[in-house]
Image: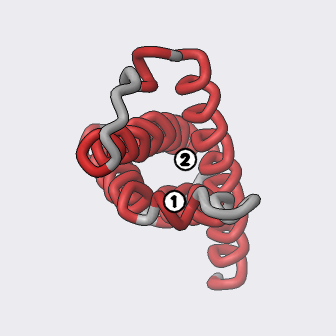
């Protein structure tokens, strides 16, 4: 179980780090952040070697929650560090100062990546049906 889960965890950590590096671009306009969590969830479902849909869901939920919380934590840590170093901002660290908003943003990222994972399960199902 841990070996199968390690692929999903590594994809979610790598996706969260990529979201941190591209965080300025993700939040720049209205809704451009939506494709990134969808692609993260899609890759979490496509990396698994399962053929039955209910075997995907537990690993997908764990990976999506890890991605959502880690991506938000890393993005806002980067924003906090940059504002402190370059702009002299002395505001409190956001996830500990206002945990309700941190939880909301994390769950939004988790939910959107979960929807992308469900789309990945459907795409993988179509591929398996047409492959045979």
One can see residue 4 in this view: no
The correct choice, above or below, for 24 with respect to 80 in the image is: below
Task: Name, please, the residue furthest toward the bottom.
Answer: 131
Between 14 and 55, the residue placed more toward the observer is 14
Categorize mark 2 by other alpha carbons within 10 Å: few (<14), some (14-19), many (20+). Answer: some
Residue, far front: 88
Q: Are marks 1 and 2 in contact (CB under 8 Å)?
A: no
| x, y percent for residue 17 | 33, 56
For label 1, the residue is 40
| Residue for badge 2 | 56
Of marks 1 and 2, which one's residue comes earlier in the chain? 1
- In depth, the one of 100 and 46 nearer the eye is 100
Real-space Cα distance between discs 1 and 2?
15 Å
Q: Residues within 10 Å of mark 1 (few under 14, many from 20)?
A: many
The location of residue 82, given as percent across then percent down, is 31, 48
Q: Is residue 37 visible?
A: yes
Residue in the image at 67% along x and 48% along y: 112
- Displayed quadrant of residue 116: bottom right
| Location of the C terminus (image quadrant) | bottom right
């Amino acid at each position: 179980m841990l070996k199968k889960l390690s692929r999903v965890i590594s994809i979610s950590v790598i996706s969260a780090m990529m979201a941190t590096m591209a965080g300025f671009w993700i939040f720049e306009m209205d809704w451009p952040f939506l494709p990134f969590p969808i692609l993260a969830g899609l890759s979490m479902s496509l990396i698994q070697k399962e053929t039955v849909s209910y075997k995907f869901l537990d690993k997908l939920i764990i990976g999506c929650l890890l991605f959502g919380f880690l991506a938000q934590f890393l993005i806002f840590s980067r924003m906090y560090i940059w504002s402190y170093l370059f702009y002299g901002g002395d505001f409190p660290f956001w996830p500990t100062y206002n945990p309700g908003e941190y939880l909301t943003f994390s769950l939004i990222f988790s939910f959107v990546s979960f929807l992308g994972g469900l789309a990945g399960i459907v795409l993988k199902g179509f591929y398996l049906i047409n492959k045979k």
